[in-house]
Image (tube, rainbow, N blue to C red):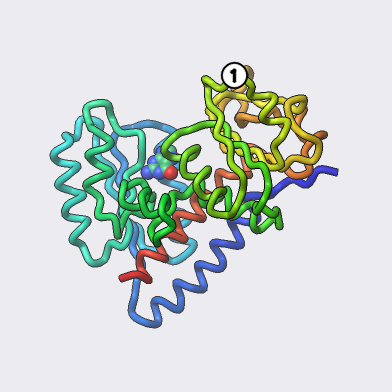
Amino acid sequence: MVQIIDGKLISAQIKDELKQEVVALKEKGIFPGLAVVLVGDNSASQVYVRNKKTACEYVGIKSFSYELPEETSEEALLELIDTLNQDEKVHGILVQLPLPKHIDENKVILAIAPSKDVDGFHPQNVGALCTGLPGFISCTPAGVIELLKRSQVEIAGKNCVVVGRSNIVGKPVSLLLLQEHGTVTICHSKTKNLTEILKQADIVVAAVGRAKMIQGSQLKEGAVVIDVGINRDENGKLCGDVDFTSCESIASRITPVPGGVGPMTIAMLMHNCVLAAKNK
Ligand code: GUN
């Protein structure tokens, strides 16, 4: 029988643990604060930002909200980041991506102080992850590892296949699996023998952004499947990069979409905010 990995339940446990930590921090006079910056009116981003602010409230982190119009200039956004970098009440800064086309995302990421980069997108934090130094680990990859660990999935020595090579998920999750002593293969749109590689995988992390791309017939019996995708299927219903129906009869454990990795991203953001406040 396949075990469904319940990201909603695990993320709720993490947020409850963090809530306790925040109580202890407040007793020491540390009041964690997160600045949440949204530029424009992307409806998906609005939902993500609302969920992040709700999580802050639950955990006891003060959120400072900046909802800026679409036409905000790059210069004005960089000025706001500079102000937030210097604000002692702000321990973490989150600029929701994607940004409007006239703003250079890389410039914005570079402008955030690495010590407040709770998204873990700044090259200093990415470099720290590469070399095993302390730093912020981006939230979705950290959430994937946490889901595996809290579901008692052993990573050491296992064949881990990551499908996708994005800076936000594919690359960092591969590094984290390697750090946990997995044998890691990264596949992408130009990979020729994807099925052959997937057939060897004990752990599959799907992060390509293509609805139901991975089929049960491509998996090894008993594989653990973590689906990072958030897509709409032909009927407009939310679905992952994994075809859940065909994979659940082959996998030993699998994450659903929604309710798998998604809630973990927010829980790990809360974790990073608490860490930023503790580091102060
Ligand atoms: N857009 C999609 N995912 C993310 C994320 O994890 N952080 C930010 N800042 N923007 C995103």
Q: What element does badge 1 sit on? A: loop
Q: What amino acid is at disc 1?
A: Lys
Indicate left or right for 146 with 134 as reference.
right
Question: Foreground: 37 or 255?
Answer: 255
> Would you say residue 53 is visible in this rendering?
no
Question: Foreground: 196 or 61?
Answer: 196
Question: Foreground: 150 or 41?
Answer: 150
Q: Quadrant of ligand 1?
A: top left
Indicate left or right for 89 with 147 as reference.
left
Residue 224 versus residue 218 in the image, above or below: below
**For the C terminus, which image quadrant?**
bottom left
Query: Which residue position holds label 1?
Result: 192
Question: Which residue is located at x 16 percent, y 34 percent?
Answer: 73
**For the N terminus, which image quadrant?**
top right
Give the residue furthest to the right: 1
Residue 104 versus residue 254 in the image, above or below: above
Residue 63 versus residue 75 in the image, above or below: below
Question: Which residue is located at x 57 percent, y 32 percent?
Answer: 163
Question: Which residue is located at x 26 percent, y 66 percent?
Answer: 89
Query: What percent of the width, then of the height, locates residue 160?
Result: 63, 41
Indicate left or right for 223 with 180 as reference.
right
Residue 19 versus residue 37 in the image, above or below: below
Res. 10 image quadrant: bottom right
Query: What percent of the width, then of the height, locates residue 24?
Result: 45, 79
Give the residue furthest to the bottom: 28
Query: What percent of the width, then of the height, locates residue 108?
Result: 24, 41
Query: What percent of the width, then of the height, locates residue 133?
Result: 40, 60
